[in-house]
Image (spheres, rainbow, N blue to C red):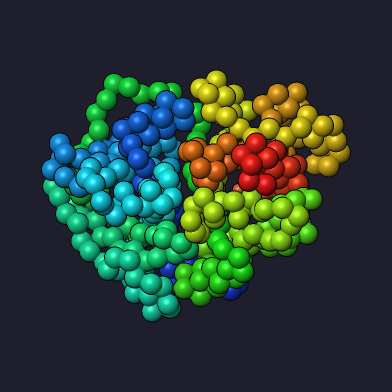
């Protein structure tokens, strides 16, 4: 006979402090508010190999917004633009540029997720509501997190449609080859001065997450820039949210630069997992995606630092991929340049070979690369 403990045993073992009042199956979708969803969809398809899934707009009876849904592996992006002037979405784009608005989480019970988190102090964004069409029904609810970013809880076990009620399947012959994106490894939020612990407490107390690792400003600083970071994870480890705040340095922190251009706290980067970073990054670079480059001297002693790796050093060096090791194994990672005019959102591509950390050993080399970019922007 199964007991409750049999059904949910790992959580107490892996994260003794994590509570299971908010079981999450994974990320459901990431919604970006963008100035031109038509062109953004084409960019994410062409450059990153996403596939067309669903559409909402004038042709489907939606007179307020146009949204394209794209997918690759388990990653689903929604790109939304306003159709009319003086909209809430339009004002948000004016304030923040193209950016992440919604981190949607896939749950079995969206109503319970809402009440359990609101009971623990979450600010409601959208009370639970049932959305229906010919494919079944979806229950969604939402709460606020840092800045004006939203978590939407999505319960879709009784739904067979392409995305959500109101969306139609997006049929197209243009299907660029995928580049090996598998799932979202982690999503990083930048928050204001002295606000990291407030949001760490939010994820711990309101959402039942536990802290994975912490860095302090000595770990993550160069001569100029500095930041502090803590990583929050849900019970099954499928959702990992590092939270950064700026720290004092000789010059402006990259987190502060983000906050200035974003006018507040928000998503700084999405880290996307691949099983073969060399193939993925080779293809991305061939399609014109630009990455931060570390100086070639980084590779002179990298193997002394991280030990033996399976990949050819020459290939790693040619592509500018970074390597780090922890007690569990190693990881390979690389960071794109910002994906829009403002120095705000970027992607990380990551391949884990056992490592469970986030590349702390690369932060110094990486931040020096970011500072060279800041120097060019005149914001250092
Ligand atoms: Fe990251």
Q: Say which residue appears at 31% left-offset and 48% top-offset.
A: 90
Q: Position of residue 334 (x, y in %)?
A: 63, 37
The N terminus lies in quadrant: bottom left
Q: Is residue 231 above or below residue 308?
A: below
Q: Is residue 329 above or below residue 72?
A: below
Q: Say which residue appears at 58% left-offset and 60% top-offset.
A: 243
Question: Would residue 367 be visible to someone looking at this image?
Answer: yes
Picture quadrant where residue 282 is located? top right
Q: Is residue 222 left or right of residue 271?
A: right
Among all residues in the image, which is located at the extreme front?
A: 378
Picture quadrant where residue 148 is located? bottom left
Q: How many marks?
A: 0
Q: Nearer the viewer, residue 4 or 379?
A: 379
Q: Nearer the viewer, residue 151 or 247?
A: 247
Q: Is residue 351 above or below residue 119?
A: above
Q: Say which residue appears at 68% left-offset and 40% top-offset.
A: 375
Question: Would residue 196 be visible to someone looking at this image?
Answer: no
Q: Position of residue 377 (x, y in %)?
A: 61, 39
């Amino acid at each position: 006979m199964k007991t409750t403990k049999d059904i949910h045993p790992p959580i107490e073992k892996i994260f003794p402090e994590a509570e299971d009042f908010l079981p999450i199956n994974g990320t459901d979708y990431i919604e970006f508010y963008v100035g031109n969803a038509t062109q953004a969809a084409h960019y994410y398809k062409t450059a990153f190999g996403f596939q067309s899934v669903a559409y909402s707009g004038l042709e489907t009876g939606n007179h307020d917004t146009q949204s394209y849904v794209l997918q690759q592996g388990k990653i689903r992006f929604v790109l939304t633009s306003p159709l009319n002037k003086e909209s809430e979405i339009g004002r948000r784009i004016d304030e923040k540029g193209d950016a992440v608005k919604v981190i949607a989480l896939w749950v079995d019970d969206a109503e319970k997720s809402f009440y359990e988190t609101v009971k623990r102090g979450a600010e409601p964004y959208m009370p639970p509501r049932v959305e229906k069409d010919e494919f079944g029904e979806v229950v969604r609810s939402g709460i606020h997190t840092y800045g004006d970013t939203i978590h939407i809880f999505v319960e879709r076990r009784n739904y067979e449609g392409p995305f959500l009620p109101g969306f139609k399947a997006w049929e197209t012959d243009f299907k660029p080859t995928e580049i090996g994106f598998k799932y979202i490894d982690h999503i990083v939020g930048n928050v204001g001065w002295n606000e990291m612990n407030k949001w760490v407490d939010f994820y711990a107390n309101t959402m039942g997450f536990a802290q994975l690792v912490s860095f302090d400003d000595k770990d993550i600083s160069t001569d100029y820039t500095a930041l502090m970071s803590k990583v929050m994870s849900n019970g099954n480890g499928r959702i990992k949210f590092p939270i950064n705040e700026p720290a004092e340095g000789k010059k402006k922190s990259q987190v502060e630069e983000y906050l200035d251009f974003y006018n507040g706290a928000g998503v700084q980067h999405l880290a996307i997992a691949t099983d073969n970073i060399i193939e993925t990054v080779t293809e991305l670079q061939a399609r014109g995606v630009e990455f931060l480059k570390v100086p070639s001297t980084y590779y002179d002693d990298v193997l002394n630092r991280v030990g033996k790796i399976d990949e050819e050093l020459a290939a790693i060096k040619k592509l500018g991929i970074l390597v780090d090791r922890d007690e569990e194994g190693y990881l390979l990672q690389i960071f794109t340049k910002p994906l829009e005019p403002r120095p705000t959102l970027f992607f990380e591509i990551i391949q884990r070979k056992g490592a469970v950390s986030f590349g702390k050993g690369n932060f110094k080399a990486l931040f020096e690369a970011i500072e060279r970019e800041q120097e060019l922007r005149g914001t250092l």
